Amino acid sequence: MQFQQLLYFVTVAETLHFTHAAEQVHVSQPSLSQQIRALEKELGADLFTRARGNIALTDAGKALLPLARRILADADTARHEVQELAQLRRGRVRLGATPSLCTGLLPDVLRTFHDLHPGIQLLIEESGSHDLVRELARGALDLALVVLPLPTPSPALTTVELLHEDLVVVSAASVPRPGRGRSVRVADLEGEPMVMFRHGYDLRELTVAACRAEGFEPSFTVEGGEMDAVLGFVRAGLGLAVVPRMVAARAGRDLRVTPLARPGLSRTIALAHRSDVDPPRAARELQNVLFASRVRQTASASSKV
Amino acid sequence: MQFQQLLYFVTVAETLHFTHAAEQVHVSQPSLSQQIRALEKELGADLFTRARGNIALTDAGKALLPLARRILADADTARHEVQELAQLRRGRVRLGATPSLCTGLLPDVLRTFHDLHPGIQLLIEESGSHDLVRELARGALDLALVVLPLPTPSPALTTVELLHEDLVVVSAASVPRPGRGRSVRVADLEGEPMVMFRHGYDLRELTVAACRAEGFEPSFTVEGGEMDAVLGFVRAGLGLAVVPRMVAARAGRDLRVTPLARPGLSRTIALAHRSDVDPPRAARELQNVLFASRVRQTASASSKV
DNA sequence: TCATGTCCATAGGTGTGGCCTATCGCGGCT
DNA sequence: AGCCGCGATAGGCCACACCTATGGACATGA
């Protein structure tokens, strides 16, 4: 049994005319006759009664017709389904990202991606790097934006560095700028009141480690909030905070941004995915958009310095 | 897209192993690989990720799998459906017959047919030859058992003589045997009380015509009943009746059967079907059973004479 | 009655493509 | 290092789906 045989059969069943059916499916009449015969032989039953000028379906033909139609329709559906997926007209990407990246990097990138592929569903999981790595390994995520170095490195994951991101100090416009002149050293933060993220933020670990490297323990007036809350507390004059430059750039005019003096602080953002399987087509496309955006991000970041 | 490609695809999707899948479908591994590649090329998307020792379905593959299974299942169903019809494991025959044939000939024949093909549904229409011919031409019947000559002959119908059937006289065992000795002439029926079928029975026309040919008009004590009623009236001593030998043979011991003296009366039973289309497979099989039964009927009939 | 037209079946030739065996290349083992 | 397992590739072979040409049966009209 072959698809073209079923197609020929259905066409003859509809036209009740071998010659016309042959034209309709663009084969010669003998080829069509031959294929119908072959189908009949394989099935072991005649499908048509061939009285001159009076073609009709046999009982077997009547039984076959609806199934043949359904098989052909399914084959058509299969072609379209697969092609829509391949052409990114449908599909989904499950992307994990740390909260600071969701706030800073993702909005523009996701907007670009969505404009390119409006049919692709975007599922974002906002978690710390640790959780993201676990979800990725489980196969619950296609991609994750993580901060290097990974808390739990594993050969099962492949990471590709995406960009280095400067950290800056933000403070309320209403309080004096910290440090001396246009920049501030980490050492200058000793004794300054700070607002700190909840545990799980990479930024928390990074900032605390930097302070300890300078020989002091940072003092927190408030701690435990998410990104938005922290920025709100800073805006309210409760203290200053260390955040990625990209986040600070979006935070609005009532926040003062003070870069850190050299060598400053920075973190490396990487894109991670499982090593054993290629990410799905749609995820690979999001990768492309992310790497393309890196060029623009880096350019605009340096122009602001 | 071809059936074997879908089969190969499903098998690989289930085993996640090209070599094992190839064994399972009895082709060489390169052939299977090649067909999967061909399918992927036609659909325009990869179906598997082929990491060494870690074959997995892509999104496109996941989308195709249920459809491929369904197509293969439908193809299987189609094969079985058609073959069941062809092998007479299923189907139906719509058979028309005159009442006297339903009573006399059919029970044994239908029993034989049903034993041979228990899956075939038997639909019997009991009518006069006139109605049967009309239903046959409409396509509402596959076959009809009629009495020749047809009331409305038509080239659209093909009739094949099935058997000649003697008519005999039946009377109640309680009344004297009609006629002289072991047989009776049609002429002897003059003045005898008779029970007659309703209009529409071929037997009525035939009997009345025979009496008139002898120069008398038959006298009916009761008329208008169906076959069973007529036999009942005869049994009750209301009169005698002319019926086919086959009917009389089934009627029981309390009816006396008297053959007609030569040349006697007989009628020709024929099997009729449309000339333009072959009867369905199951109907042809019933034809065979009917013609086979003719041999036995004729033999047993002659042995009884 | 014969010519003509229609329509499906048959005959014979051709090329594609599905199948095979043999082999390669790569990665994971012992 | 060497072997093994596994999928991809190469090249040859043959079946079969396709074509054109023709046959044969039936219907129609001059």
Image (cartoon, coloured by chain):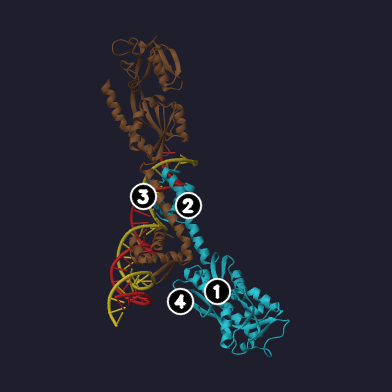
Chain colours: A cyan, B brown, C red, D yellow
Instruction: Looking at this view, name the residue that lies furthest to the right.
Output: A174
First in residue order: circle 4 vs circle 3: 3
Residue D26, quarter of picture? top left
Q: Secondary structure at mark 2?
A: helix
Badge 3 marks a residue whose secondary structure is: helix
The image quarter containing residue A238 is bottom right
Please indicate whether residue A75 sits to the left or right of residue B28 in the image: right
Which label is found at residue A128?
A: 1
Q: Please, is residue A55 above or below residue B134 in the view? A: below
Foreground mark, 4 or 2, reads 4
Q: Residues within 10 Å of mark 1 (few under 14, many from 20)?
A: many
Badge 4: chain ID: A
Foreground pick, A194 / A72: A194
Cα–Cα gap, marks 4 and 2:
48 Å
Please report, as a chain letter, where disc 2 is located. A
Q: Earlier in the sequence, mark 2 or mark 3?
A: 3
Q: Label 3: which residue?
A: A41
| Mark nearer the N terminus (2 vs 1) | 2
Whether residue B38 appears in this view of the structure is yes
Q: Which label's residue is closer to the chain start, 4 or 2? A: 2
Mark 4 highlights which residue? A154
The residue under label 2 is A70
**Marks 4 and 2 on same chain:** yes
The tag earlier along the polypeptide, 3 or 1, is 3
Secondary structure found at label 1:
loop
Answer above or below: position of B207 versus B157. Answer: above
Horizontal relation, residue A294 to residue D27: left or right? right
Q: Quadrant of the C terminus of chain A?
A: bottom right
